[in-house]
Image (tube, rainbow, N blue to C red):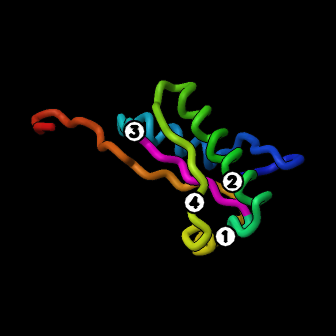
Amino acid sequence: MQLEDGRPQQSQGLDDAVWAIQHWGVQGITVGGYSDGNASDKNKATALSIAEFAVAELAKVGIRANAMVLPTEQSQRVRGESAGVEFEVVRAPQREGTKP
């Protein structure tokens, strides 16, 4: 996820994730944010800001989600980017012919 002056910005990766979540009909998602391993209070505040940004983007297309900060240990395992989000499906979409 791109940050500009410490604020999350729209990115193709987030757009793709929102499209996929909407396409699959998923509701009930937890969005966990991370920033530089969530090692400091400042990193955790940035991580929450990033997660809240992603939740707001999901809300624009009618998808409910909750924002949280990933636990430090879990966020330190994320590789490739220093800041971003992970999506966790809390409630799977209802499929035709299946019982809840």
Q: Which residue is mark 4?
A: 70
Mark 4: which amino acid?
Leu
Q: Image check: 45 left or right of 33?
A: right
Total marks placed: 4
Q: Which residues are magenta?
A: 28-35
Disc 2 to disc 4, how far (Cα)?
A: 8 Å
Residue at (20% x, 37% y) in the render: 95
Q: Quadrant of the C terminus?
A: top left
Which mark, by number, is residue 28?
3
Choose the circle earlier in sequence order: 4 or 1: 4
Q: Which residue is mark 1?
A: 80
Mark 1: which amino acid?
Gly
Q: Image check: 73 left or right of 41?
A: left
Q: Which residue is mark 2?
A: 47
**Magenta-drawn stretch, dominant element (helix, strand or loop):** strand
Disc 4 to disc 1, how far (Cα)?
A: 16 Å
Mark 3: which amino acid?
Gly
